[in-house]
Image (cartoon, rainbow, N blue to C red):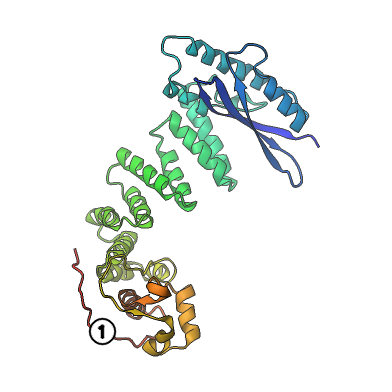
């Protein structure tokens, strides 16, 4: 069955080898609803540079190279070959613009070539949004990244890309986007929240706390900032309750939802000589059944980070305290932690 050409995307140019990398996305039907062809064109050797593309399209799509692609690629190839022959050629950084080019098979308005830079940025933004709205995060991220190569300060692109990267677990990259956002809009609350959230995932809780507290200096009644600051303090071994109390007062439903579903009850501060309770002892310690203990471990966030899968006393105390204080369980737990051997400094 003949596939439909969707778009051609340039992936980069290596001036040392003369290789121009590109990919073609095809639309089809059935199980192969979409296919991607990756290939390289070899510049500087004469002959029909587009021959590999012609062969791939004939084999996989029963298609010839569309006139817009033929014209556009030849224009790009001529520019690259002329540039390579100049005195400043063969510098990789000079060819980053190649990765910003996308060609549509039939509509010149949806391709970036032959447009002013501002319009090229709009075209890449439109492609990225289209994929984002269709739920294709991989392609959306790809196009947002290409957009930012062309327009590094494109704020809507930075904001949306930071969210997509976070949602797909690319936390270091999401943090980088949050930092770029803050370079453009220093002290912007949402950017600080995004930065703090990423730092929490990376277990850089001291820096995360700084970000959340920067929001609270401007807006002391921001519930999400209080929740973030509470999480940062808790991971560091500090007392999260002042911030959690504030969050509960401001938005009790959201605060309880976080405490039940996403709050990390671990204490990352190391306490020497800390008691570790075997899981088998917890029913007697807390006055509940073994099945309830399993529910706490699997569904309620009780951490088991001690040796041999046991429960560290600091984490058990933190977890029980917050469950009881904010009434997160159907019934309160009966637990009184022994006097700690070491009281961590709260900063």
Q: Position of residue 31 (x, y in %)?
A: 74, 47
Residue 263 in sight: yes
Crowd class of label 1 (few under 14; some 14 to 19; many from 20; radius 10 Å): few
In the displayed structure, 196 sits above or below 179; it is below
Residue 204, position as x, y percentages in the image: 31, 55
In this orientation, does residue 302 appear?
Answer: no
Q: Is residue 35 left or right of residue 252?
A: right
The residue at 58%/48% (across/down) is 135
Q: Under tag 1, what secondary structure?
A: loop
| Residue at 68% from the left image edge and 23% from the top image edge | 52
Height in image: 15 above or below 250?
Answer: above
**Which residue is pictured at 30% across the width and 69% down the height?**
244
Quadrant location of the N terminus? top right
Q: Is residue 341 above or below residue 219?
A: below
Measured from the top left, where is residue 330 in percent x and y? 43, 84
* Residue located at (41% from left, 13% from top): 88
Q: Is residue 147 above or below residue 160?
A: above
Q: Which residue appears farthest toward the right when viewing the image?
A: 1
Q: How many marks?
A: 1
Q: Is residue 285 left or right of residue 213?
A: right
Residue denoted by label 1: 338
- Quarter of the rendering containing residue 58: top right
Residue 162 drawn at (x, y percent):
43, 46
Quadrant housing residue 140: top right
Q: Which quadrant, please, contains the C terminus?
A: bottom left
Quarter of the view holding residue 250: bottom left
Q: Is residue 62 left or right of residue 100?
A: right
Q: Please state if 320 lies on the left or on the right of 141 as rendered.
A: left
Q: Please name whichever residue, 278 or 95, is drawn nearer the observer in this view of the structure.
A: 278
Q: Nearer the viewer, residue 160 or 142?
A: 142
């Amino acid at each position: 069955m003949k596939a439909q050409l969707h778009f051609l995307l340039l992936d980069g140019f290596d001036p040392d080898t003369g290789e121009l990398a590109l990919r073609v996305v095809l639309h089809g039907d059935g199980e192969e609803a979409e296919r991607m062809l990756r290939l390289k064109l070899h510049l500087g050797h004469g002959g029909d540079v587009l021959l590999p593309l012609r062969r791939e399209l004939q084999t996989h799509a029963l298609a010839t190279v569309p006139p817009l692609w033929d014209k556009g690629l030849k224009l790009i190839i001529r520019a690259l070959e002329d540039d390579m022959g100049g005195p400043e050629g063969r510098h990789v950084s000079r060819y980053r613009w190649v990765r910003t080019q996308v060609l549509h098979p039939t509509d010149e308005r949806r391709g970036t070539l032959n447009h002013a830079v501002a319009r090229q940025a709009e075209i890449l933004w439109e492609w990225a949004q289209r994929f984002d709205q269709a739920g294709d995060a991989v392609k959306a991220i790809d196009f947002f990244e290409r957009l930012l190569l062309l327009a590094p300060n494109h704020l809507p692109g930075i904001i949306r890309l930071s969210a997509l990267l976070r949602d797909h677990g690319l936390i270091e990259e999401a943090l980088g986007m949050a930092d770029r956002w803050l370079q453009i809009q220093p002290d912007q609350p949402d950017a600080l929240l995004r930065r703090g959230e990423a730092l929490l995932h990376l277990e850089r809780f001291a820096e995360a706390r700084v970000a959340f507290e920067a929001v609270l200096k401007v807006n002391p009644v921001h519930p999400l900032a209080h929740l973030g600051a509470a999480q940062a303090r808790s991971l560091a071994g500090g007392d999260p309750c002042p911030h959690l109390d504030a969050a509960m007062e401001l938005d009790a439903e959201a605060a309880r939802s976080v405490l039940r579903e996403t709050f990390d009850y671990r204490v990352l501060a190391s306490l020497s000589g800390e008691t570790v309770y075997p899981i088998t002892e917890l029913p007697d310690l807390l006055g509940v059944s073994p099945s309830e203990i399993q529910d706490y471990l699997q569904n309620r966030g009780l951490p088991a980070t001690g040796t041999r899968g046991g429960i560290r006393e600091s984490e058990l105390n933190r977890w029980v305290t917050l469950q009881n204080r904010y009434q997160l369980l159907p019934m309160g737990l009966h637990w009184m932690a022994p006097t700690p051997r070491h009281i961590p400094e709260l900063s």
